[in-house]
Image (cartoon, rainbow, N blue to C red):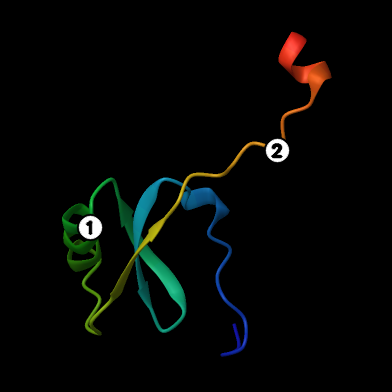
């Protein structure tokens, strides 16, 4: 992965991730859990912890409101 691209984070929606050198190395339900999971992977570099918000549903329309 080059430095201009970022990892695909859709799979981590609603979770915390630990990112090292542009790569997700661990995740968890809390920042603390993501950090502990990162340490369990024996990553030597300090991770960046980031919350990935849940995916949003599309705009509401009358047809899907009646369903």
Q: Is residue 37 above or below residue 49?
A: above
Q: Nearer the viewer, residue 25 or 7?
A: 7
Quarter holding the N terminus is bottom right
Looking at marks 1 and 2 on the same chain, the residue that comes earlier in the sequence is marked by 1
Q: Quadrant of residue 34?
A: bottom left
Q: Going 77% across and 19% down the picture, which residue do you hit? A: 64
Q: State the SS at label 2.
A: loop
Residue, disc 2: 58
Residue 37 falls left or right of residue 20: left
Rendered image: mark on residue 5: none
Q: Going 41% across and 45% down the picture, which residue do you hit? A: 14
Using a 10 Å C-alpha cutoff, classify the residue at mark 1 as few (fewer than 14 neighbours), some (14 to 19) or many (20 or more). some
Residue 4 falls left or right of residue 37: right
Q: Going 72% across and 16% down the picture, which residue do you hit? A: 65
Q: How many marks?
A: 2
Q: Is residue 2 above or below residue 19?
A: below
The residue at the far bottom in this view is 3
Using a 10 Å C-alpha cutoff, classify the residue at mark 2 as few (fewer than 14 neighbours), some (14 to 19) or many (20 or more). few
- Number of the front mark, 1 or 2: 2
Residue, disc 1: 31
Q: Position of residue 31 (x, y in %)?
A: 22, 57
Q: CA distance from mark 1 to mark 2?
A: 28 Å
Q: State the SS at label 1.
A: helix
Q: Nearer the viewer, residue 13 or 34?
A: 13
Q: Position of residue 32 (x, y in %)?
A: 16, 57
Q: Please indicate, yes or no, whether residue 67 appears anywhere in the rendered image.
A: no
Residue 6 falls left or right of residue 54: right
């Amino acid at each position: 992965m080059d430095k201009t691209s970022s990892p695909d984070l859709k799979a981590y929606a609603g979770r915390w991730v630990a990112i090292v050198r542009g790569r997700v190395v661990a995740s968890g339900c809390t920042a603390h859990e993501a950090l502990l999971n990162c340490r369990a992977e024996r990553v030597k570099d300090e991770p960046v912890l980031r919350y990935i918000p849940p995916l949003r549903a599309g705009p509401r329309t009358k047809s899907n409101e009646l369903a």
